[in-house]
């Protein structure tokens, strides 16, 4: 700031003169002006200092209360806790500058001093707002992902904090420069072009990173859950910043980039609180109609006896070598091992009950019929010839 502006400062200052060329004269003029202001407004200055100290004390007490509240809610990521963290991040210097700015007008300082106070106040408040905004965003991210994978979140928080800090403080710098009268249009355009260039150069990395954040926040699956991805069924072992590791049912380790993982349909078996089991049962055609009518009730009895929910059992169709029935029942469990054990138990109970009831399970069979040239059905094999009488034994010579 040019000290020649001091010539026009003060409540009763004379009209501005030409700018002095000697810095020593400017400093002397500024000193005389400040001494004159303090001599003529000492009472207002004293009252302003007292009011400023009181305001600073009140603001400090509010910040201390916020700190205690944040510490009492440690471990809980609530909105109150986030607000406490934000207030706690308020710097003591900023509180002092706010107090000075609130009482500066009452003391009627010279124009130059008021400009300096306003400039420092603007810089301090803009930077403090950037810090507040960073804490709010980070707090909301941690709160949203509080039930997610803590390891992945802790790995990602460093990069998230860096990206958010760069973005917010870049905006703060632009706001400060704009308040100083600097033309920031070119700077904004340069930052935009630079951001686009960096984004294109690291497109793959940022794509997987944002996909990882999407998994953390949206939580389509978690570590330890079994999912079906494309044609593979596997258990999630680790969610990384670039890739996710899955352990297939056969034991292979599948490493899939987060972008590719989210680009296809995912079936999460962990959220199946009930699983439907379907059995197709075929009986032979020699089964009597009465036995066919009794079969659905027999199947229902075995399902209910095993402790599961029976849905329905009905005749489906006439098969090539069987009369086909369908059985549907639900198992209330999200553990695949429990469901597999229930399916096995019900299947064994059905086999035992049907065997004791005289039902025959069908299996693929084929019967051939042979016709004579005139169309008469004949046996598929020739009749066995009658055995010829045994020849008499020759008499032994005497």
Image: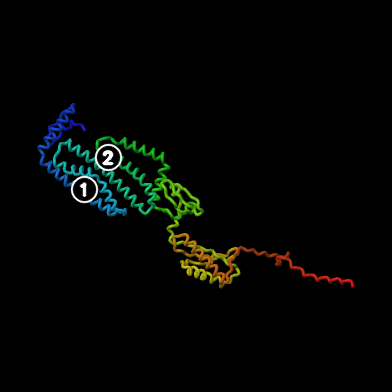
Up-down: is 151 above or below 21?
below
Disc nearer the start of the sequence (1/2): 1
Residue picked out by circle 1: 60
Up-down: is 182 above or below 334?
above
At 63% from the left and 64% from the top, the residue drawn is: 365
At 49% from the left and 61% from the top, the residue drawn is: 340
- Tag 1 and tag 2, C-beta contact below 8 Å: no
In the rendered image, which quarter contains the N terminus?
A: top left
Instruction: State the image quarter where residue 192 is shown.
Output: top left
Q: Nearer the viewer, mark 1 or mark 2?
A: 1
Q: CA distance from mark 1 to mark 2?
A: 27 Å
Number of marks in picture: 2
Disc 1 on helix, strand or loop? helix
Q: Residues within 10 Å of mark 2 (few under 14, many from 20)?
A: some
At 37% from the left and 48% from the top, the residue drawn is: 154
In the rendered image, which quarter contains the C terminus?
A: bottom right
Q: Residues within 10 Å of mark 1 (few under 14, many from 20)?
A: some
Rendered location of residue 208, percent (x, y):
42, 45
Rendered location of residue 378, percent (x, y):
71, 67
Disc 2 on helix, strand or loop? helix
- Farthest-out residue, right: 398
Residue nearer the viewer, 201 or 163: 163
Give the numbered dot on residue 175.
2
Up-down: is 135 above or below 383?
above
Rendered location of residue 218, percent (x, y):
38, 52
């Amino acid at each position: 700031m040019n000290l020649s502006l001091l010539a026009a400062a003060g409540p009763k200052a004379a009209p501005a003169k030409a700018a002095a060329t000697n810095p020593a004269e400017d400093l002397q003029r500024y000193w005389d002006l400040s001494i004159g202001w303090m001599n003529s407004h000492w009472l207002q200055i004293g009252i302003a200092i007292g009011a400023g100290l009181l305001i600073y004390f009140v603001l400090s007490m509010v910040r201390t209360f916020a700190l205690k509240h944040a510490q009492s809610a440690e471990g809980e990521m609530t909105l109150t806790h986030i607000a406490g963290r934000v207030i706690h991040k308020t710097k003591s210097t900023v509180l002092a500058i706010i107090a000075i700015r609130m009482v500066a007008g009452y003391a009627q300082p010279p124009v130059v001093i008021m400009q300096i106070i306003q400039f420092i106040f603007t810089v301090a408040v803009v930077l403090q707002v950037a810090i507040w905004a960073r804490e709010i965003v980070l707090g909301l991210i941690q709160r949203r992902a509080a039930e997610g994978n803590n390891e992945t979140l802790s790995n990602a928080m460093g990069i998230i904090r860096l990206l958010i800090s760069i973005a917010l403080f870049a905006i703060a710098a632009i706001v400060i420069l704009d308040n100083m009268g600097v033309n920031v249009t070119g700077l904004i355009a340069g930052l935009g072009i630079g951001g686009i260039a960096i984004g294109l150069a690291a497109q793959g990395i940022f794509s997987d990173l944002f996909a990882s954040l999407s998994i953390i926040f949206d939580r389509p699956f978690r570590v330890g859950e079994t999912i079906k991805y494309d044609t593979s069924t596997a258990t999630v072992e680790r969610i990384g910043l670039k890739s996710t590791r899955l352990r297939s049912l056969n034991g292979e380790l599948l490493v899939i980039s987060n972008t590719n993982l989210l680009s296809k349909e995912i079936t999460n078996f962990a959220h199946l609180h009930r699983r439907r089991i379907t059995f197709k049962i075929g009986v032979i055609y020699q089964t009597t109609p009465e036995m066919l009518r009794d079969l659905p009730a027999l199947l229902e009895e075995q399902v209910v006896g095993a402790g599961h929910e029976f849905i329905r059992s009905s005749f489906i169709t006439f098969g090539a070598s069987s009369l086909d029935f369908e059985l549907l029942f639900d198992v209330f469990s999200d553990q695949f091992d429990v469901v597999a054990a229930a399916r096995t138990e019900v299947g064994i109970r059905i086999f035992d009950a049907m065997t004791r009831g005289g039902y025959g399970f069908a299996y693929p069979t084929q019967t051939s019929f042979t016709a004579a040239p005139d169309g008469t059905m004949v046996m598929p094999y020739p009749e066995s010839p009658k055995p010829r009488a045994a020849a008499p034994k020759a008499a032994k010579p005497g």
